[in-house]
Amino acid sequence: KLKKSRTEMELAAKEAAARAAFAAFDADGSGTLSVEELVGVFTRPGGGQPVDEAEARAFVAKHDRNGDGELDLDEFVVAMVRPAEAEAAICSAALEAAAAAVREAPIEAFLRPNEGYWKRLDGAVLDPALRVDEALGGSPVRLVDSRFLIELAESGGRLRRRQDLPEEAFVRPEALRRLPPTGDSGLHMRIISISHPWQQPDNPDPKGINLRLLARALRTLTGLGSSCLPWAVFIDFLSCPQKGPNGEDRSEAEAELFKRALADMMAWYAHPKLLTLKLTQLPPNYPAGFAFPAGMTPNTAGYFERGWCFCESSVSNMCKSSSLVLDLGKLTPETEGLVALAMECTAKRDPPLPPA
Protein backbone atom coordinates (compact mmCIF):
# COMPACT_ATOMS: atom_id res chain seq x y z
CA LYS A 1 0.00 0.00 0.00
CA LEU A 2 2.88 2.35 0.89
CA LYS A 3 4.52 1.56 -2.46
CA LYS A 4 1.31 2.34 -4.33
CA SER A 5 0.89 5.59 -2.42
CA ARG A 6 4.46 6.58 -3.25
CA THR A 7 3.84 5.82 -6.94
CA GLU A 8 0.71 7.94 -6.92
CA MET A 9 2.60 10.78 -5.26
CA GLU A 10 5.36 10.55 -7.88
CA LEU A 11 2.82 10.66 -10.71
CA ALA A 12 1.08 13.66 -9.14
CA ALA A 13 4.42 15.46 -8.84
CA LYS A 14 5.27 14.71 -12.48
CA GLU A 15 1.87 15.93 -13.59
CA ALA A 16 2.24 19.16 -11.61
CA ALA A 17 5.69 19.69 -13.12
CA ALA A 18 4.33 19.07 -16.63
CA ARG A 19 1.52 21.58 -16.08
CA ALA A 20 3.97 24.17 -14.82
CA ALA A 21 6.25 23.55 -17.79
CA PHE A 22 3.33 23.93 -20.17
CA ALA A 23 2.40 27.28 -18.65
CA ALA A 24 6.00 28.48 -18.92
CA PHE A 25 6.47 27.35 -22.50
CA ASP A 26 3.13 28.53 -23.90
CA ALA A 27 4.77 31.70 -25.14
CA ASP A 28 1.72 33.24 -26.82
CA GLY A 29 -0.76 32.22 -24.11
CA SER A 30 -2.94 30.38 -26.64
CA GLY A 31 -3.49 27.33 -24.46
CA THR A 32 -1.63 25.12 -26.94
CA LEU A 33 1.99 24.39 -27.74
CA SER A 34 3.01 24.78 -31.38
CA VAL A 35 5.91 22.96 -33.02
CA GLU A 36 7.93 26.18 -32.83
CA GLU A 37 7.27 26.50 -29.10
CA LEU A 38 8.24 22.88 -28.53
CA VAL A 39 11.55 23.40 -30.29
CA GLY A 40 12.14 26.24 -27.86
CA VAL A 41 11.17 24.08 -24.91
CA PHE A 42 13.70 21.41 -25.59
CA THR A 43 16.56 23.71 -26.59
CA ARG A 44 16.47 26.09 -23.63
CA PRO A 45 19.09 25.58 -20.93
CA GLY A 46 17.81 23.02 -18.45
CA GLY A 47 14.85 22.27 -20.67
CA GLY A 48 15.96 18.82 -21.81
CA GLN A 49 17.84 17.42 -24.80
CA PRO A 50 17.96 19.66 -27.87
CA VAL A 51 15.57 18.67 -30.65
CA ASP A 52 15.30 19.93 -34.17
CA GLU A 53 12.08 20.89 -35.93
CA ALA A 54 11.59 17.44 -37.48
CA GLU A 55 11.80 15.77 -34.07
CA ALA A 56 9.38 18.31 -32.58
CA ARG A 57 6.91 17.65 -35.40
CA ALA A 58 7.17 13.91 -34.79
CA PHE A 59 6.54 14.45 -31.07
CA VAL A 60 3.42 16.52 -31.81
CA ALA A 61 2.17 14.03 -34.39
CA LYS A 62 2.50 11.19 -31.89
CA HIS A 63 0.60 12.86 -29.04
CA ASP A 64 -1.84 15.16 -30.86
CA ARG A 65 -5.14 13.41 -30.17
CA ASN A 66 -7.50 15.94 -31.77
CA GLY A 67 -5.51 16.40 -34.96
CA ASP A 68 -5.13 20.19 -34.77
CA GLY A 69 -1.34 20.10 -35.21
CA GLU A 70 -0.62 21.38 -31.69
CA LEU A 71 -0.64 20.05 -28.12
CA ASP A 72 -3.13 21.31 -25.59
CA LEU A 73 -2.54 21.02 -21.84
CA ASP A 74 -4.08 17.56 -21.43
CA GLU A 75 -2.22 16.18 -24.46
CA PHE A 76 1.08 17.57 -23.17
CA VAL A 77 0.59 16.20 -19.66
CA VAL A 78 -0.33 12.75 -20.96
CA ALA A 79 2.69 12.78 -23.28
CA MET A 80 5.06 13.69 -20.45
CA VAL A 81 3.62 11.63 -17.60
CA ARG A 82 1.92 8.36 -18.64
CA PRO A 83 1.03 8.17 -22.31
CA ALA A 84 0.48 4.40 -22.51
CA GLU A 85 -1.85 4.20 -19.48
CA ALA A 86 -3.87 7.23 -20.53
CA GLU A 87 -4.24 6.03 -24.12
CA ALA A 88 -5.51 2.61 -23.02
CA ALA A 89 -7.99 4.11 -20.53
CA ILE A 90 -9.37 6.62 -23.05
CA CYS A 91 -9.78 4.00 -25.78
CA SER A 92 -11.48 1.54 -23.44
CA ALA A 93 -13.93 4.19 -22.21
CA ALA A 94 -14.63 5.28 -25.80
CA LEU A 95 -15.49 1.72 -26.86
CA GLU A 96 -17.97 1.43 -24.00
CA ALA A 97 -19.50 4.83 -24.78
CA ALA A 98 -19.93 3.82 -28.43
CA ALA A 99 -21.57 0.53 -27.47
CA ALA A 100 -23.88 2.36 -25.04
CA ALA A 101 -24.94 4.81 -27.78
CA VAL A 102 -26.16 1.92 -29.89
CA ARG A 103 -27.88 0.16 -26.96
CA GLU A 104 -29.83 3.33 -26.12
CA ALA A 105 -31.65 3.23 -29.48
CA PRO A 106 -32.00 -0.40 -30.64
CA ILE A 107 -31.89 -0.72 -34.40
CA GLU A 108 -35.15 -2.69 -34.40
CA ALA A 109 -37.01 0.59 -33.99
CA PHE A 110 -35.83 1.72 -37.44
CA LEU A 111 -36.51 -1.42 -39.47
CA ARG A 112 -39.10 -2.06 -42.14
CA PRO A 113 -41.46 -5.04 -41.68
CA ASN A 114 -39.97 -7.00 -44.60
CA GLU A 115 -36.95 -7.30 -46.93
CA GLY A 116 -38.72 -5.91 -50.00
CA TYR A 117 -36.27 -3.08 -50.66
CA TRP A 118 -33.26 -5.35 -50.10
CA LYS A 119 -34.50 -7.59 -52.90
CA ARG A 120 -35.53 -4.69 -55.14
CA LEU A 121 -32.11 -3.02 -54.83
CA ASP A 122 -30.21 -6.25 -55.52
CA GLY A 123 -28.96 -6.84 -52.01
CA ALA A 124 -28.56 -10.52 -52.91
CA VAL A 125 -25.18 -9.62 -54.46
CA LEU A 126 -23.90 -8.96 -50.93
CA ASP A 127 -25.37 -12.04 -49.29
CA PRO A 128 -22.34 -14.36 -49.78
CA ALA A 129 -20.11 -11.98 -47.82
CA LEU A 130 -22.69 -11.54 -45.06
CA ARG A 131 -23.77 -15.17 -44.68
CA VAL A 132 -22.81 -16.70 -41.33
CA ASP A 133 -20.92 -19.99 -41.50
CA GLU A 134 -21.66 -21.75 -38.22
CA ALA A 135 -18.65 -24.04 -38.61
CA LEU A 136 -16.34 -21.02 -38.84
CA GLY A 137 -18.13 -19.03 -36.16
CA GLY A 138 -19.01 -15.97 -38.23
CA SER A 139 -19.43 -14.32 -41.60
CA PRO A 140 -16.69 -13.11 -43.97
CA VAL A 141 -17.86 -9.50 -43.56
CA ARG A 142 -19.60 -7.65 -40.73
CA LEU A 143 -20.92 -4.12 -41.22
CA VAL A 144 -20.55 -1.48 -38.50
CA ASP A 145 -23.30 0.74 -37.13
CA SER A 146 -22.64 4.38 -38.06
CA ARG A 147 -23.77 5.49 -34.60
CA PHE A 148 -21.00 3.38 -33.05
CA LEU A 149 -18.37 5.07 -35.22
CA ILE A 150 -19.69 8.55 -34.50
CA GLU A 151 -19.64 8.05 -30.73
CA LEU A 152 -16.25 6.31 -30.86
CA ALA A 153 -14.75 9.35 -32.60
CA GLU A 154 -16.47 11.92 -30.39
CA SER A 155 -15.30 10.06 -27.25
CA GLY A 156 -11.67 10.18 -28.35
CA GLY A 157 -11.48 6.51 -29.36
CA ARG A 158 -9.50 4.73 -32.04
CA LEU A 159 -10.32 2.10 -34.65
CA ARG A 160 -10.00 -1.45 -33.38
CA ARG A 161 -9.85 -4.63 -35.41
CA ARG A 162 -13.03 -6.62 -35.88
CA GLN A 163 -12.11 -9.26 -33.27
CA ASP A 164 -11.70 -6.60 -30.55
CA LEU A 165 -15.03 -4.81 -31.01
CA PRO A 166 -18.14 -5.28 -28.84
CA GLU A 167 -21.15 -6.94 -30.43
CA GLU A 168 -23.03 -3.63 -30.36
CA ALA A 169 -20.65 -2.30 -33.03
CA PHE A 170 -22.17 -4.48 -35.73
CA VAL A 171 -25.40 -4.47 -37.73
CA ARG A 172 -26.84 -7.98 -37.86
CA PRO A 173 -27.54 -9.29 -41.41
CA GLU A 174 -31.24 -9.81 -40.67
CA ALA A 175 -31.51 -6.17 -39.51
CA LEU A 176 -29.45 -4.91 -42.46
CA ARG A 177 -31.89 -6.45 -44.94
CA ARG A 178 -34.75 -4.48 -43.39
CA LEU A 179 -33.08 -1.07 -43.12
CA PRO A 180 -35.09 1.56 -45.04
CA PRO A 181 -33.50 2.82 -48.26
CA THR A 182 -32.45 6.42 -48.74
CA GLY A 183 -32.09 8.90 -51.60
CA ASP A 184 -34.13 11.68 -53.18
CA SER A 185 -33.32 11.29 -56.86
CA GLY A 186 -33.26 7.49 -56.71
CA LEU A 187 -33.37 4.89 -53.96
CA HIS A 188 -30.18 3.28 -52.73
CA MET A 189 -29.30 1.12 -49.75
CA ARG A 190 -28.29 2.58 -46.43
CA ILE A 191 -24.81 1.07 -46.72
CA ILE A 192 -21.50 2.95 -46.95
CA SER A 193 -18.23 1.49 -48.25
CA ILE A 194 -15.06 3.18 -46.98
CA SER A 195 -11.93 3.43 -49.14
CA HIS A 196 -8.81 4.59 -47.30
CA PRO A 197 -5.00 4.26 -47.29
CA TRP A 198 -3.58 2.36 -44.33
CA GLN A 199 -1.17 4.44 -42.23
CA GLN A 200 0.47 1.57 -40.31
CA PRO A 201 0.61 -2.17 -41.00
CA ASP A 202 -1.19 -2.93 -37.72
CA ASN A 203 -3.82 -0.16 -37.87
CA PRO A 204 -5.03 1.98 -40.77
CA ASP A 205 -5.68 5.00 -38.57
CA PRO A 206 -3.84 4.70 -35.23
CA LYS A 207 -4.32 8.37 -34.26
CA GLY A 208 -8.01 8.56 -35.16
CA ILE A 209 -7.51 11.34 -37.72
CA ASN A 210 -9.55 9.67 -40.45
CA LEU A 211 -12.05 8.38 -37.90
CA ARG A 212 -12.85 11.94 -36.82
CA LEU A 213 -13.21 13.04 -40.44
CA LEU A 214 -15.44 10.07 -41.23
CA ALA A 215 -17.55 10.77 -38.13
CA ARG A 216 -18.23 14.31 -39.37
CA ALA A 217 -19.62 12.94 -42.62
CA LEU A 218 -21.57 10.19 -40.86
CA ARG A 219 -23.07 12.72 -38.44
CA THR A 220 -24.27 14.74 -41.42
CA LEU A 221 -25.69 11.69 -43.17
CA THR A 222 -27.24 10.17 -40.05
CA GLY A 223 -28.51 13.40 -38.54
CA LEU A 224 -28.81 14.37 -34.90
CA GLY A 225 -30.75 12.72 -32.11
CA SER A 226 -31.74 9.15 -31.32
CA SER A 227 -34.54 9.12 -33.90
CA CYS A 228 -32.23 9.45 -36.92
CA LEU A 229 -31.67 6.42 -39.10
CA PRO A 230 -28.32 4.62 -38.82
CA TRP A 231 -26.20 3.47 -41.74
CA ALA A 232 -24.29 0.20 -42.04
CA VAL A 233 -20.61 0.80 -42.80
CA PHE A 234 -18.06 -1.44 -44.52
CA ILE A 235 -14.53 -0.60 -43.40
CA ASP A 236 -12.00 -3.38 -43.91
CA PHE A 237 -10.19 -3.22 -40.56
CA LEU A 238 -13.44 -3.46 -38.61
CA SER A 239 -15.43 -5.59 -41.06
CA CYS A 240 -12.98 -8.39 -41.95
CA PRO A 241 -10.93 -10.66 -39.63
CA GLN A 242 -7.49 -9.14 -39.03
CA LYS A 243 -4.09 -10.33 -37.84
CA GLY A 244 -3.15 -9.75 -34.21
CA PRO A 245 -1.83 -6.36 -33.00
CA ASN A 246 1.74 -7.68 -33.13
CA GLY A 247 1.33 -9.43 -36.46
CA GLU A 248 0.08 -12.73 -35.05
CA ASP A 249 -1.50 -14.98 -37.67
CA ARG A 250 -5.26 -15.29 -37.95
CA SER A 251 -6.75 -18.52 -36.64
CA GLU A 252 -7.69 -21.13 -39.26
CA ALA A 253 -11.34 -20.05 -39.11
CA GLU A 254 -10.43 -16.35 -39.33
CA ALA A 255 -8.09 -17.00 -42.25
CA GLU A 256 -10.85 -18.79 -44.17
CA LEU A 257 -13.36 -16.02 -43.48
CA PHE A 258 -10.80 -13.42 -44.58
CA LYS A 259 -10.14 -15.36 -47.79
CA ARG A 260 -13.87 -15.32 -48.55
CA ALA A 261 -14.09 -11.60 -47.74
CA LEU A 262 -11.29 -10.86 -50.21
CA ALA A 263 -13.08 -12.85 -52.91
CA ASP A 264 -16.10 -10.53 -52.66
CA MET A 265 -14.22 -7.31 -51.78
CA MET A 266 -15.02 -5.36 -54.93
CA ALA A 267 -18.76 -5.96 -54.51
CA TRP A 268 -18.80 -3.22 -51.87
CA TYR A 269 -17.42 -0.68 -54.36
CA ALA A 270 -19.04 -1.96 -57.56
CA HIS A 271 -22.62 -2.14 -56.28
CA PRO A 272 -24.46 0.79 -57.92
CA LYS A 273 -26.79 1.29 -54.96
CA LEU A 274 -24.16 1.73 -52.22
CA LEU A 275 -22.44 4.96 -51.17
CA THR A 276 -18.62 5.08 -51.32
CA LEU A 277 -16.73 7.49 -49.04
CA LYS A 278 -13.08 8.02 -49.92
CA LEU A 279 -10.57 9.20 -47.31
CA THR A 280 -7.89 10.48 -49.67
CA GLN A 281 -5.55 12.50 -47.43
CA LEU A 282 -2.60 11.23 -45.39
CA PRO A 283 -1.92 13.00 -42.05
CA PRO A 284 0.31 16.10 -42.10
CA ASN A 285 4.04 15.26 -41.97
CA TYR A 286 3.30 11.55 -42.45
CA PRO A 287 5.05 9.21 -41.56
CA ALA A 288 6.53 11.26 -38.69
CA GLY A 289 5.08 10.08 -35.38
CA PHE A 290 3.89 6.70 -36.72
CA ALA A 291 5.29 3.28 -35.76
CA PHE A 292 6.64 0.66 -38.16
CA PRO A 293 8.39 -2.69 -37.67
CA ALA A 294 12.16 -2.59 -37.76
CA GLY A 295 13.45 -2.58 -41.30
CA MET A 296 10.13 -1.60 -42.87
CA THR A 297 10.05 1.42 -45.16
CA PRO A 298 6.81 3.41 -44.67
CA ASN A 299 4.56 3.63 -47.71
CA THR A 300 4.35 7.36 -48.37
CA ALA A 301 2.45 6.97 -51.66
CA GLY A 302 -0.74 9.01 -51.80
CA TYR A 303 -4.24 7.60 -52.00
CA PHE A 304 -4.42 7.53 -55.80
CA GLU A 305 -0.97 5.91 -56.08
CA ARG A 306 -1.86 2.95 -53.86
CA GLY A 307 -3.11 -0.22 -55.53
CA TRP A 308 -6.14 -1.07 -53.40
CA CYS A 309 -7.23 2.57 -53.13
CA PHE A 310 -6.87 3.16 -56.87
CA CYS A 311 -8.89 0.04 -57.63
CA GLU A 312 -11.66 0.86 -55.13
CA SER A 313 -11.86 4.43 -56.38
CA SER A 314 -11.90 3.46 -60.06
CA VAL A 315 -14.55 0.77 -59.60
CA SER A 316 -16.73 3.12 -57.57
CA ASN A 317 -16.45 5.91 -60.14
CA MET A 318 -17.23 3.53 -62.98
CA CYS A 319 -20.24 1.79 -61.43
CA LYS A 320 -22.04 4.46 -59.42
CA SER A 321 -23.79 7.76 -59.91
CA SER A 322 -21.45 10.65 -59.08
CA SER A 323 -23.69 11.51 -56.12
CA LEU A 324 -22.81 8.14 -54.56
CA VAL A 325 -19.02 8.68 -54.54
CA LEU A 326 -17.77 11.33 -52.10
CA ASP A 327 -14.16 12.36 -51.49
CA LEU A 328 -13.86 13.41 -47.85
CA GLY A 329 -10.41 14.79 -48.58
CA LYS A 330 -12.29 17.82 -49.94
CA LEU A 331 -14.18 18.36 -46.68
CA THR A 332 -13.38 21.71 -45.05
CA PRO A 333 -13.93 22.88 -41.45
CA GLU A 334 -16.66 25.19 -42.80
CA THR A 335 -18.67 22.40 -44.48
CA GLU A 336 -22.08 22.22 -42.83
CA GLY A 337 -25.11 20.19 -43.85
CA LEU A 338 -25.93 17.46 -46.32
CA VAL A 339 -26.18 19.72 -49.38
CA ALA A 340 -22.75 21.27 -48.75
CA LEU A 341 -21.25 17.84 -48.12
CA ALA A 342 -22.56 16.55 -51.45
CA MET A 343 -21.53 19.64 -53.41
CA GLU A 344 -18.01 19.94 -52.01
CA CYS A 345 -17.11 16.25 -51.87
CA THR A 346 -18.62 14.75 -55.02
CA ALA A 347 -15.78 12.81 -56.65
CA LYS A 348 -15.30 13.51 -60.34
CA ARG A 349 -14.57 10.75 -62.80
CA ASP A 350 -11.01 10.77 -64.10
CA PRO A 351 -10.40 10.38 -67.85
CA PRO A 352 -9.45 6.88 -69.05
CA LEU A 353 -5.82 5.92 -68.55
CA PRO A 354 -3.70 5.95 -71.72
CA PRO A 355 -2.31 2.62 -72.98
CA ALA A 356 0.89 1.54 -71.27
Image: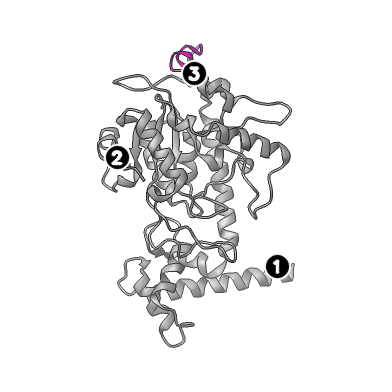
Looking at the rendered structure, the secondary structure element under dot 1 is: helix
- The residue segment tinted magenta is 114-121
- Which label sits on residue 111? 3
Picture residue at 59% right of the left edge, 54% below the top: 89
Question: In this figure, which residue is indicated by the disc labeled 1?
Answer: 4
Picture residue at 42% right of the left edge, 61% below the top: 286
**Image quarter of the N terminus:** bottom right
Identify the amino acid type marked 1. Lys
Q: CA distance from mark 2 to mark 1?
A: 62 Å
- Which label sits on residue 350? 2
* 339 on left or right of 93: left
Residue 315 against residue 134 in the figure, above or below: below
Label 1 crowding class (10 Å Cα cut-off): few <14, some 14-19, many 20+? few
Label 3 crowding class (10 Å Cα cut-off): few <14, some 14-19, many 20+? some
Q: CA distance from mark 1 to mark 3?
A: 52 Å
Looking at the rendered structure, the secondary structure element under dot 3 is: loop
The answer to whether any part of residue 74 appears in the image is no
Q: Position of residue 293 (x, y in %)?
A: 59, 62
Task: Tell whether position 133 is magenta.
Answer: no
Q: CA distance from mark 3 to mark 2?
A: 37 Å
- Which label sits on residue 73? none
Secondary structure mostly seen in magenta is helix
Q: Which one is nearer the viewer's eye here, 335 or 54?
A: 54
Q: For marks 1 and 3, give the one nearer the viewer.
A: 3
Picture residue at 30% right of the left edge, 33% below the top: 338
Q: Earlier in the sequence, mark 1 or mark 3?
A: 1
Residue 280 against residue 18 in the figure, above or below: above
Residue 348 against residue 64 in the figure, above or below: above
Q: Position of residue 265 (x, y in %)?
A: 52, 34
Label 2 crowding class (10 Å Cα cut-off): few <14, some 14-19, many 20+? few
Looking at the rendered structure, the secondary structure element under dot 2 is: loop
Identify the amino acid type marked 3. Leu
